[in-house]
Image (cartoon, rainbow, N blue to C red):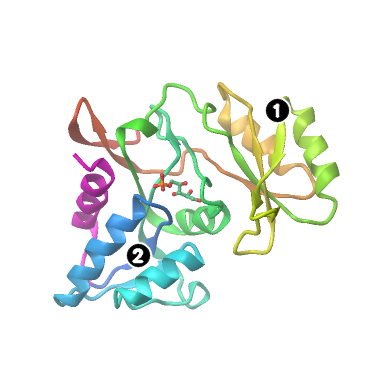
Amino acid sequence: MNEKKVVGEKAVEYVKDGMVVGLGTGSTAFYFITKLGELVQQGLSIKGVPTSKQTEKLASELGIPLVSFNEIEQIDLAVDGADEVDPELNLIKGGGGALLREKIIAKASKTFIVIADSHKNVDTLGFFPLPIEVVPYGFKMTMKHIRDLGSTTKLRQHQGNPFLTDNGNYIVDTSFQKIRQPKELEKNLNLIPGVVDSGLFVEMADAAITIIDKKLVTQVRK
Ligand SMILES: O=C[C@H](O)[C@H](O)[C@H](O)COP(=O)(O)O
């Protein structure tokens, strides 16, 4: 079973005519967006708000009408992948470096659905290196402050240079492991000058569409 395809395509059932839809980033969101593109070709009328330049390109190629984020008051539904999902539906995101726009769009959405294959489900967040977006200015000092919170830090690279996000920032990959209090860690990280945001999405997802014991499951956050 192509789990990413199954969960991505299932999420399309939540899209209704006339909605403004946040379009996630990554290999799972790809299947959601591709299916949505098919429905748009068949007459579904929606407007998409992409969470990255990569998704903007994909959605444009598929003929999904896009709207500028600053032109709208609210997003009806956002659908996005994740790197880890815990039983409370807290997430680690940002494996592809898109965490900031993804978080801004998830926060602006009436409903935020995460789509995740079975490998993303964990008891405790933190095995996947938590990505943190930092401004380039003074990044070495920012990394030191992150380490002071109990992690190692690694500046993400791309073709021999620091990886640049769509916002012109850097990504620091960390190793907090067993993040038992994600809300507290998120707050502490955001108190560091130079940190733009982290890939911790705490109490944001309303539902998760995932695979458990080879079965498609929709979990709703309590
Ligand atoms: O920055 C990337 C995003 O947060 C992705 O949604 C996340 O990394 C999951 O990606 P994938 O669906 O490719 O595993």
The amino acid marked with disc number 1 is Ser
82 relative position to 41: left or right: right
Observer-nearest of 109 and 166: 166
Label annotation for residue 151: 1
User: What residue is shown with label 2?
Assistant: 21
Using the image, determine if residue 51 lies above or below residue 124.
below
Residue 78 position, x and y percent, is 37, 57
**Badge 2 density bin: few <14, some 14–19, many ≥20, Cα 10 Å:** many
Mark 2 or mark 1, earlier in chain? 2
Q: Quadrant of the C terminus?
A: top left
Instruction: Give the alpha-carbon distance from disc 2 to disc 1, as whole Å.
Output: 35 Å
Question: Is 221 displayed left or right of 170 in the figure?
Answer: left
- Magenta span: chief secondary structure: helix
Contact (CB < 8 A) between labels 2 and 1? no
What residue type is disc 2 on?
Answer: Val
SS assignment at label 2: strand
Snapshot quadrant of residue 215: top left
Q: On screen, 62 above or below 187?
A: below
Is residue 3 found left or right of 79 in the rendered image?
Answer: left
Instruction: Give the quarter of the figure containing the N terminus.
Output: top left
Q: Residue 161 is drawn in which quadrant?
A: bottom right
Q: Residue 38: give x, y in percent of width and height.
A: 19, 69
Q: Could you tell me which residue is drawn at 56 percent across and 52 percent down?
A: 97
Closer to the camera in the image, 47 or 152: 152
- Looking at the image, which residue sits at the far front? 160
At 22% from the left and 62% from the top, the residue drawn is 35
Q: Which residues are magenta?
A: 1-17
